[in-house]
Amino acid sequence: MKSKLLPLILVLTFLIIFVIFFKSLKSSNIYTPNTTLEKKIPSFDLKSFENNSIIISEKIFKDNEYYFMNIWASWCIPCKEEHKFLMELKKGGKIKLIGLNYKDNFKNASNFLKDLGNPYNIIVSDNDGTGSIEWGAYGVPESFLVYQNKIIKRFIGPISNEDLLEIQKIIK
Amino acid sequence: MKFIYIFLIISVILNFNFLKADEIKTENKIAKNLRCLICQGQSVYDSDSEFAISLKLMIKNKIQQGMSEQQIYSFLKMKYGEWILYDPVFNRNTYFLWLLPILIFLAGGAIIIKRFYNKK
Amino acid sequence: MASLIGSYSLGFGLFFSVFIILFSVRNLRDTEILDKKIVSFTFIQFFFVVISFFGLIISFINSDFSNETVFNHSHTTKPLFYKISGTWGNHEGSLLLWLLVLTLFISIFLFKSNHQPKRYRIFTLLFQQIIIIGFFIFLIKNSSPFNYIFPTPNEGLGLNPILQDPALAIHPPVLYLGYVGSSIIFSSALAAMVTSYVTKEWAKHIKQWVLASWVFLTLGILLGSIWAYYELGWGGFWFWDPVENVSLMPWFALTTLLHCILVLEKKKILTSWAMILSIATFALSMSGTFLVRSGILNSVHTFANDPERGLFILIFLFTLIFLSIFIFIFFHSDKEKIENNFFWLSKETSILVNNWFMMYFLSVILIGTIYPIFLEVITANKISVGPPFYNKLILPFLIPFLLAMAIGPNLNWIKSELKDKFYMIIFLIISFLLSAFIIKQFNINFLINTILVSSAFFLFFSTLREFFAKRFKNLSQNIAHFGFSLLILSILFNNIFSNEVITNLKIGETFKTEKFTINFENIDQEDEKNFKAIKGKFKIQYLDGSSDILNPELRIYNQPNIITSEADIKTNLLTDKFMTMNYVQNQEYFNVRYQVKPFMIWIWISVILISFGGFLSFFKKRYEI
């Protein structure tokens, strides 16, 4: 009895291991945080981009308006790609764009906006990167669609044309 | 009976402190127990990515604000998910992770002891 | 040209497998002696792989960018040394190296096993051929190092700068010698089962291979660790990274086997266990390759991740596993009842205890490494298993392990009693007092630390005494165990007493701690052949008035365009002083990391001692009591 059961268990175990390895081959091994969760927006107080006054998050986000919070930097190449979509989004006028300037210097960042246009209603600067951590971000660019003080949708990496259409659909 | 014994062992193991706790600052300890999201094979402590540098700064700030180690972990867990913690929490998902090695150890011991009993 | 020849010789090499198998099968029935042709064919196959390998090396030396592998991993401005080592610094080349060692080892095996039964030799060769054919097909089918690109690019993409390091140049070959050595053990165990040759004679003969692979594997892991310490610039030598774990698992299996074989060599017991271990060692080496190359684990060590390659290795690996399960079940009979009596206090028991702990450590690492994969597939949850997990599950178990290791080698076979109780108690007391004193001295009063350090000291003194008490009778084992105690001690002290600071500093700024101040004096620029270096000058002033100057470096490589940071390390017998600096985006300051790491060099020395022990026992005919 024992001698027959053991091989069977052995073979079964290895079959299961095989199937699991096989399945995991297909899934990506790069971890991205769960983006679907609806979360309350974190509060922050950061320096304004233009001058050194402190901007408190409670004063920016009002209840019944849509906000698009975008983390960007002039040294970040994908930010340049997504910039035209931000300008497009701004044209619609139904949404306020908040820029969070990540570890940038003022001169480069202003040149960047001068060249490509400034889509942002308000820009805060995050010199040491701690502000973006409060938002659960870990790279540039990253964006958050905010409504009623909640993050409705999160975009890791540059937004695409599809993302833009989706946002426009939501805010209609 | 066996289960109580196993549980006791586990709770002892889970509760004893990490080797260097007393020596290095909590800051480094926390950073070492966090996994970096940019270079995903590294700890935040080891990594020099922008994200890791900011996160280290942020840990420092949080400690100065009087947050405890556990509070910082749960804060980051909320932001980035359980993945960021290098020390897996003992819960439904990780029972096997923590218990299986101990079970194997006990089973191994049992096999060895059995060898001696068999002959008598 | 060179890569064309290389490519063709691969094909010829595979072709010879057919001959080898044909003649081997025929030879099985025929005469009593091994057909000379088989040996010649094996040599010829090896020869073709050598040619192929040299073809690749020459393509690298000549920077022949019409070869895709060379194009992807080399560059004209790269120093010659790294052009050559770049040959095996990539997926395709390293597989070719695997194949080279595979064919080399089977040739050596045939050459050295003259006194073994013919059928056993042929079966070993046949099983080894299965592995060799698998690698040939894998290489030719989807990891060919000789892919041709047209039009020929002018310049290559370059080798990742962190791979341009002397330790890393020799790390893969040494590690593969260990991995592939285990393939011989695997084939030979299968052959021994098929031909009912699991005997003392077999144990004696295979022990040489176990020892050789074990020494290479140990050194290979050491080199990887040294590379991580000097090149990665994080100040650590072991990160419990999946890729590191994957090399440690076969090491544990092999170490267990090494001890188990000693028993098997003495008397015919534990045969099934030895078979399982022989199979497991190679299966673990292969799954390591699978886990690393398929990219299902994410780790700091990046290989080109290609699911298709992963699939091939996976199927190949499980074919071998099922084949060995089949053979184990149907051919292996456990006829060991005769001599199966030994007292609880005996050398056999102590080896069993060693095996028990080794298996436990192995299971911790195995489960910790693959559990996240299982969890993700089953529940879609992603978790990380890192250093705290391993520390929590391994450290407490190290205490009884160290104590057993101190007592075990002093016991006799079959039945023994505790000898030299007097010394043991004295050593135990001394160890405890010493560690309590050391730990108190530095104000870190942790019971677990004291006990751990005590048990390591206990092993240290016990093995030290053995050197004299046994008059170098069992030198190899003694050196290895002594090295192990030294390793544990140095790692513990390194952990407990290391001191580290990470801070942001501008040029001219000073950072103060209780024990030292760091002054960032200035930076310097230098141009090298394939990189630009920015050197920082830091002065560290200690409380006792002494000071150090450290020059960590930032390197901006031209191809690929990557910034790396080079640590500056001041090593002496007691401590290492380790400093790196890093560029921070758009800030005036640099991120500076300064670490004082005690006994660093002793970690390397003790691992060298451990493998030297194994090396010595290679020259010994028999295990002595």
Image: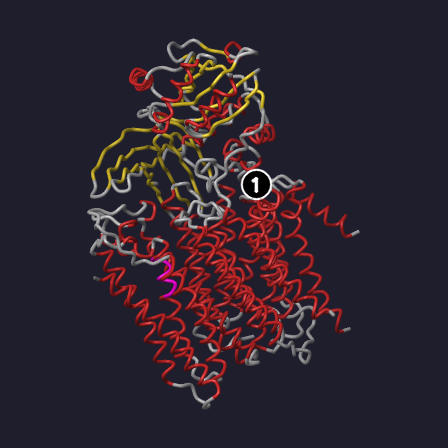
Q: Which residue is nearer to you in this view: C464 or B17?
A: B17
Residue under label 1: C383
| Residue occupying the point 48% across, 73% down | C127
The residue drawn where x is 75% and y is 71% is B118
Above or below residue C18? Residue A35 is above
* Residue C434 can be seen, yes or no: no
The quarter of the displayed image where residue C411 is located: bottom right
| Quadrant (top left, top right, bottom left, bottom right) of the C terminus of chain B | bottom right
Magenta-highlighted stretch: main secondary structure?
helix
Q: Is residue C96 magenta?
A: yes
Q: Mark 1 — on which chain does it sit?
A: C
Identify the residue at the far right of this view: B1
Q: Secondary structure at mark 1?
A: loop
Foreground pick, C315 / C548: C315
Amino acid type, label 1: Ile
Left or right placement of residue C425 versus residue C297 in this view: right
Residue bounds of the magenta highlight: C93-99
Question: What residue lies at 39% left-to-right and 15% top-to-bottom?
Answer: A119
Q: Position of residue C555 (x, y in %)?
A: 28, 38
Vertical position of residue A88 compared to residue B35: above or below: above
In x, y percent, where is residue C494?
Answer: 48, 45
Name the image quarter holding residue C566.
top left
Picture coordinates of residue C87, whole percent (x, y): 30, 56
Vertical comparison of C372 with C318: above or below? above
